[in-house]
Image (spheres, rainbow, N blue to C red):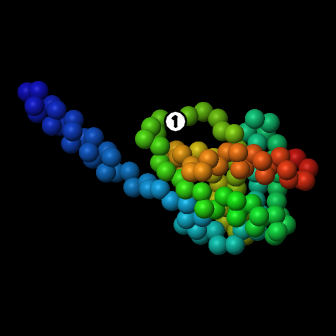
Amino acid sequence: MKKSMFLMLFVILFLLSACSNEKTQTLEDFYKDAKIEKVHKVIIQDGSTGYSKTITKHEQISEFLDLIKNIKFTPQDNQEKSVGWRYSIALFDGEKEFKFTLHQIGNTYYDSNPDIHPIVENYYKQLDIVEE
């Protein structure tokens, strides 16, 4: 009886882990998969204040994307729901939008390497754009 319960539990865990097809990839891979080819606008929202800054100048968009596009996102082992976020970023290609937080893309939680938080925070604070 114990053996069959253990075997059944093992099979269930195996199937659950096999269902997750999330893999480590760069941020650029994520937004390219979302069909974002040319970013025309970026909105960075500060989760602690609710303020956001909108970037529309090509040079600033390129500078920001160069800082973050090669950051690798690895799915976290623990996918329990969390509450709150520090920064939310939306990339726009015309009407198409790719939105993510620093630790969540879609319904999956990630760790970033290098840590994306200080990069986004420093860039956000240095932006000479009025907060909305």
Q: Amino acid at mark 1?
A: Lys
Q: Is residue 100 above or below residue 9?
A: below
Q: Nearer the viewer, residue 99 or 75?
A: 75
The residue beneath circle 1 is 81
- The quarter holding residue 9 reads top left
Q: Residues within 10 Å of mark 1 (few under 14, many from 20)?
A: few
Residue 73 pos. (x, y %) = 53, 53
**Residue 131 visible in the shown view:** yes
118 sits left or right of 18 in the view: right
Label 1 residue SS: loop
Q: Give the residue at the far left of this rendering.
A: 1
Q: Position of residue 102 (x, y in %)?
A: 63, 47
Q: Nearer the viewer, residue 77 or 14?
A: 77
Identify the residue at the far bottom of this view: 37
The residue lying at 76 percent from left, 42 percent from top is 46
Q: Position of residue 68 (x, y in %)?
A: 66, 58
Picture quarter with the N terminus: top left
Residue 54 lies, with reference to residue 109, above or below; the image says below
Q: Quadrant of residue 61?
A: bottom right
Q: Residue at x 26, y 45 (%)?
A: 14
Residue that appears at 44% across and 37% down: 78
Q: Is residue 17 left or right of residue 79?
A: left
x then y, percent, for residue 98: 64, 59
Furthest residue in direction front, as rendered: 114
Q: Residue furthest top?
A: 2
